[in-house]
Image (cartoon, rainbow, N blue to C red):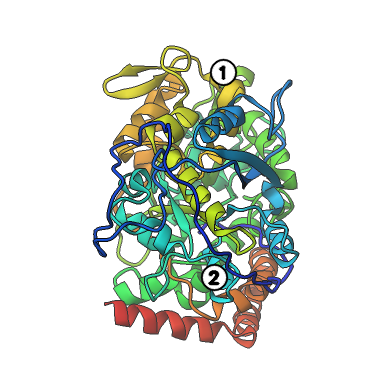
Amino acid sequence: MRIRRVASLAMASVLAGTLLAGCGGGTGNLPAASGSSTGTTGNSGGTSKYQTTYGSKQFNNVTLKVELFDRSNAPSGSTITDNRWTKYCQDAMAKVGINLEFVPVPRSDEVTKMQTMMASQTAADIMLTYTYSYAESYFDQGGTWDLTDFIDGEDQAKNLKAYLGDEVLNIGRNADKRLYGVVAKRATTAEDNIYIRKDWLDDLGLSIPETPDELLSVAQQFVQKNPGGVSNPIGLWPCMTQSLRMAFSQVLDDSLKSQVAFTEDVIWDYYDPGMKEMFRWMNKAYNTGTMHSEYYTMKGVGAASTGEDQYKSYIVNGQLGCFEDNVNYGIDVLRGSLLKTLQENIPTAQLTSIPGLKNVNDGKVHTIGYSKGGLICFVPKTASEETVEAAVTYMDWMCSKDGGFVIYHGNEGEHYEMKDGVPAVKDAQYNATDKDWIRTDLFITGNQGYFNSEEEFNKTTATEQPQYSDLIIKSYEDSEAGEQAHYGTYTSPSTPELITDLNLAKNQYEVSTVTCPEADFDTTWQEYMDTLKNTGIDKVITEREEYYKNVK
């Protein structure tokens, strides 16, 4: 996973509610379900207890509360809970007797807020998180519903199962194959890019760097020779380090070790010997003045997100020569079209992505991508049995063309036109203020959009900014270049109790190992490893090794 902030609040205990009996309802004058047919389940041959394919049941004015991430980005005239698209969802649910309400939660504080809501039994009926370990722990403690009986079965949640597929759906199952949550399908597994000022390279007669040492040399020359003629040039900003991690990893040729390592960054730091050399490389970059002296206070290793605007300003003002960040970060409309603003300020500026760096051990390009699952939706026990049925029905509708597709892409003729088999954006600026600001958070069963393939996603995303279409496609292709690995989704039993303290140590030492004097690096790194060991990380490692040995 990307280097990220971790809430310091330990996970609160779950106060489990009691099961409420009765499913109620019947069929009435309903909208047609996409490919649905009520009847018997494939396993039992009897009538299903629940009907969760949208349109297969008329509810009796059931209230369903759904968490909605709030990024404080609603345009004038709208709020996060009162806008064109929340009303669209509410109208669709009203047709089947569901009264839909949205519960806003600040995206920057979602873990802490989730913990508080779960502990106080004030959680929404559908809760969201990107941290599977929390969702599974709540389930293990009896605080959330088992969704297996609401989804498994031939006639249940048909849109949901068709869109997600077994591979994604099964990510939300525990070791006993019970569904503790519904995992969103990622439209792309691409994670990050290294971006570099191509015009600076050309001015200095330099080639695209292919190795970590070449990248460091290029970044140092950006600072020393200042080809842009800007004040205080910054050579390098490692906001994410995933490309660098893959360039230094020493476990790539061992399938067991790579599965153990490629999970939380703190586990990767401890388990993969190559991470010490990666941080040594960053320490050298810092001590030679190649990196901003206070990068960690803005956006980067252990940094809070409050300084992101300052970080972006270094990009658009032409001071930053190279950075590693989320895939397409330098171009994305929702992140402010940074390249567009840069070129408005400096017309000759050129920004390009580069493929992954060659690994220092085997000389090959390796990249890592997300698993096929994104966030996970779970249902607390404070919801009644029929509310759970309504919750799954809502998620099922989200997986239909009338649901998730419209929420993400909008309406044909207004927001997009079909070209070459994909919805091509008509006016990116209009879409940004009309729907794009909320589409990714409202569409809870998909991450980064409603698409059937990564190729479809790449082509559609490229239409958002036609002037940069080639670079957008290149960015996604570069992010998945070479031999690609994926993050694991397994959460070991001790992870939920230990991960907060482990990540607190990570946030502290991933800064100090980079910023300490070069002569102190080895000592500082050993302090980091000792702290993780004393915090109990070996228990997590042992559990992960045993799990993947059994899987293999």
Point 40% across, 58% down: residue: 49
Percent coordinates x, y for residue 333 in the rendering: 55, 28
Q: What residue did someone put label 1 on?
A: 429
Point 45% across, 86% down: residue: 542
Taking the image as drawn, is residue 176 in sight? Answer: yes
Q: Are marks 1 and 2 in contact (CB under 8 Å)?
A: no
Number of residues whose C-alpha sits closer than 10 Å to that of mark 1, classed few (under 14), some (14–19) or many (20 or more): some
Above or below — where is 363 with respect to 356?
below
Q: Quadrant of the C terminus?
A: bottom left
Residue 353, picture quadrant: top left
| SS assignment at label 2 | helix
Percent coordinates x, y for residue 250 in the rendering: 38, 71
Percent coordinates x, y for residue 522 in the rendering: 60, 78
Q: Is residue 420 left or right of residue 351?
A: left
Above or below — where is 155 with respect to 97?
below
- Residue type, numbered disc 1: Gln
Percent coordinates x, y for residue 465 in the rendering: 46, 21
Of 212 and 265, the residue lying toward us: 265
| Figure disc tally | 2
Question: How many angstroms separate mark 1 from mark 2 (CA)?
Answer: 42 Å
Looking at the image, which residue sits at the far top?
413
Residue 139 bears which disc, if any? 2
Taking the image as drawn, is residue 445 in sight? Answer: no
Frontmost of labels 1 and 2 is 2
| SS assignment at label 1 | helix
- Residue type, numbered disc 2: Phe
